[in-house]
Image (spheres, rainbow, N blue to C red):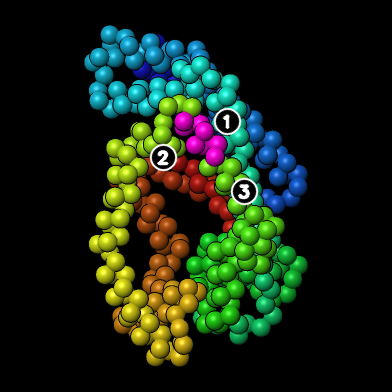
Amino acid sequence: PTWDDLVLAMDEIHARLKSFGYVLERLSWNRLGDAWIQAWSHCSERLQDFQRSLKHHPDLFQLYQRLANSPIARHFTPARKRTLAKVLRQFRQNGLAHTAQADLKDLQLRIQGARDLFLEHLHEANKAWSQTFDDEARLSGLPSSFKQRMADQARMAGRKGWLLMLDEESFRLVTRYADDHALRKQIYVAFSTRASDQGPHAGVFDNGEVLAQLLRDRHEHATLLGYSNYAQMALEPEQAESPEQVLSFLQERLAQQRSVFARDTEQLEKFAATQGFSGLQPWDHQYLAEKLRRQTTGVSGQATSAWFELESTFAQLLLIARDLFGVNIVERQDVATWHPNVRLFEVR
């Protein structure tokens, strides 16, 4: 085998599969009907099965070994040598050079199943929580564009008023801008306790045992391959020498920043007292930090966003792509999409 007909050819296959899977995954977030979810699950399982088959393919492993041991490989660039070493390491970590291949394969299936179940629980927990408002006063402080999105969501759900869903953007905007203290607390608690034994859906989608099983299976997988623990195995392709080195680095960074954190917290606590807050709660941090920033600089985050109107900003991004890389990105109007806000662009 050569670099082009093996490494580059396999890279092309992986890239196409990854791109296809990425598109399907993003679509699955928007198509919530049972038929779509079943179709996505079926395709996802087949995709994962095929990817697993490549990772456990003995003939592929032998081809990569032959290339790595060939005379031509001695003249490869350092980047190519590192790539080959990484691929061979992945094959070995998947058990192809180990006597207990069946046990390792079973463990990997269990690990993948736990990952999928964790994400499924998280997704279901997100969908399970929502709040409908018929009084716009409770939405005081929120950006008008976000309130419009909430109104659109309510209309699509057949409700009146404004519908608040549980997602990262909603969490960020509500905790940062909402004047309603109870609303900030409500979404903070709901978001921070998703898929756990706490919060508004305590125990319903609990990932506690899923995570515990995932830790046990990962540890067993690593020890079967001769590692002390999973962290040691995961760090092998990285620049860090050991898990202890990573922890030491993080602890040093924390020590360096501790005084900064303490100063910022003290400043925020003093500001909170001037705003009538009796104490600083987790759901108040971002809200008060935004108010303090606005008072100090005279500029709010919402005002900054207004300077970057979508169409003009997007047009400039397309020009940058053209001028820097010679790439033309053209909008296609002749392709149907699943939502009126979705736009399709073609790279030429």
User: Which x, y percent locates residue 227?
Assistant: 41, 31
Which residue shows up at 29% across the image and 37% down it? 241
Q: In the image, which disc is placed on residue 159?
A: none
The disc labelled 1 sits on which kind of residue?
Answer: Leu
Q: Quadrant of the N terminus?
A: top left
Please report the bounds of the magenta region as a residue range.
216-223
Q: For the residue labelled by badge 3, is the local secondary structure a helix, a strand or a loop?
A: helix
Q: CA distance from mark 1 to mark 3?
A: 17 Å
State the residue position of label 2.
Answer: 231
Q: Is residue 202 above or below residue 185?
A: above
Q: Quadrant of the C terminus?
A: top left
Which residue shows up at 66% across the image and 74% down it? 162
Sequence order check, earlier mark of 1 and 2: 1
Q: CA distance from mark 1 to mark 2?
A: 16 Å
The disc labelled 2 sits on which kind of residue?
Answer: Ala
- Whether residue 270 appears in this view of the structure is yes
State the residue position of label 1.
Answer: 107
The disc labelled 3 sits on which kind of residue?
Answer: Glu
The one nearer the camera, 73 or 285, is 285
Q: For the residue labelled by badge 2, is the local secondary structure a helix, a strand or a loop?
A: helix
